[in-house]
Amino acid sequence: TTATSLTRGVTLHGIQSWVALPDGHEDDAPAFHHHPAATLPLIENRGVSLRVIAGEAFRQRSPVVAASPMLYVDVAMTADSRFEFPAEHEERAVYVVDGTVQIAGTAVASGQLASLTPGVTTGIHASAAARLMLLGGARFPTPRHIHWNFVASTQQRLDAAGQAWRVRNRERFPDVPGDDQEFMPLP
């Protein structure tokens, strides 16, 4: 119950991810769409469970709309399990959430991100239980600029977003419903 959770405490394990928008979509209106876990493709094979959260991977497509070709997959591995991460996306990486895995023979531990060689199918092995996130997609034709929570295709767009945030431009950045009491300044 909620009262029990408040008195005993609850451990929450989650990952917040941001996906940069491709050229031509940076000014798309914000949107939110809920997709229950049961609607997300699940592949289970020999101790490896892969849930395709967004994009397309392992010949499965998530119902989550993505503005560019991508993959975002939650992976749970049991002890002594392995799978092949196909080279179907130009840029790919593995983030180890929990445990340690061998990626192409190199140990990658919890909290580490391994960037994979483009065009090469990569073997991943867990000698003990592990949790991973697979991510990747098509390379953007223009580089991205990053500052704090802002990502843009040009420095000018990045600077304009920062300025709009500093002056609390609510037309550009409306308050989040139910979360209008605290303002986080731009670092």
Image: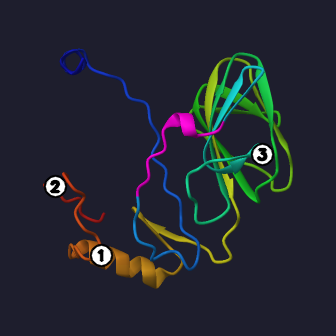
Contact flag, marks 1 and 3 (Cβ < 8 Å): no
Q: Residue at x 51, y 81 (%)?
A: 154
In this view, the residue farthest toward the right is 120
Q: Amino acid at mark 2?
A: Glu
- Disc 1 versus disc 3: nearer the observer: 3
Question: On the image, numbered disc 1 is attached to which residue?
Answer: 172
Question: On the image, numbered disc 2 is attached to which residue?
Answer: 182
- The magenta segment: 32-41
Name the dominant secondary structure of the magenta segment: loop
Q: Position of residue 147 (x, y in %)?
A: 43, 67
Q: Position of residue 141 (x, y in %)?
A: 68, 76
Q: Position of residue 33 (x, y in %)?
A: 44, 53
Viewer-nearest residue: 116 or 174:
174
Q: Quadrant of residue 67?
A: bottom right
Per the image, is 174 magenta?
A: no
Is tag 3's residue or tag 2's residue first in the polypeptide sequence? 3
Residue at disc 2, secondary structure: loop
Q: Position of residue 70 (x, y in %)?
A: 66, 57
Q: Quadrant of residue 75?
A: top right
Q: Amino acid at mark 3?
A: Arg
Q: Residue at x 36, y 81 (%)?
A: 160
Q: Amino acid at mark 1?
A: Arg
Q: Quadrant of residue 136?
A: bottom right
Q: CA distance from mark 1 to mark 2?
A: 17 Å
